[in-house]
Amino acid sequence: MLVLTRKQDESILLGKNTEKHVLGIEEGKVKLGIDAPRDVEIHRKEIYIQIQEENRAASIPPKELGSIHVKELFRKLDKKEQK
């Protein structure tokens, strides 16, 4: 881990296109500003972890599907839509 000390109105660069600015320091809190390209996702760590957990949960098939083959499942859905 790289540890840097910055004062208010100073910044650091991550790569060529991402800059972190120290905007203010009040009551033990640091206010940061981040300049990054639009395609760079920026999340608070706790939100990022929550997104990852939800993605993992969504990738686990529901138990009621059991061993039904995916093609069979779609056949059943198609039959329902045709009625």
Image (cartoon, grey):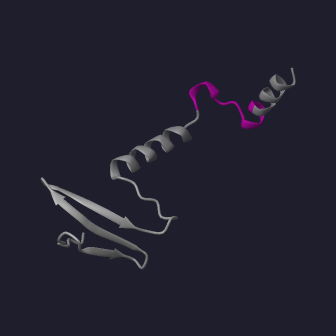
Quarter holding residue 53: top left
Kindly indicate the quadrant of the structure image that contains residue 28: bottom left
| The one of 80 and 30 positioned closer to us in this rendering | 30
Looking at this rendering, what residue extends furthest in the bottom direction?
A: 16
* Image x and y of residue 73, in percent: 74, 31
Q: Nearer the viewer, residue 46 or 78?
A: 46
Residue at the location (42% across, 58% down)?
42
What residue do we see at 55% from left, 41% from top? Answer: 59
Residue 46 spot, x, y in % from top left? 34, 47
**Where the N terminus falls, by quadrant?**
bottom left
Q: Pinpoint residue 26: horizontal percent, then vertical percent.
A: 15, 56
Quadrant holding the C terminus: top right
Q: Is residue 26 magenta?
A: no
Magenta part of the protein: which range? 62-73
Rendering quarter of residue 6: bottom left
Instruction: Say which residue appears at 40% left-offset and 77% top-offset.
Output: 15
Q: Give above or below for 82 relative to 26.
A: above
Nearer to me, 22 or 78: 22
Residue 15 position (above or below residue 40) = below
Q: Is residue 45 left or right of residue 25?
A: right
Expressed as whole percent of the image width and height from the top left, the position of residue 12 reads 29, 75
User: Does 68 sit left or right of 1 as displayed?
Assistant: right
Residue situated in front as seen by the camera: 62 or 38: 38
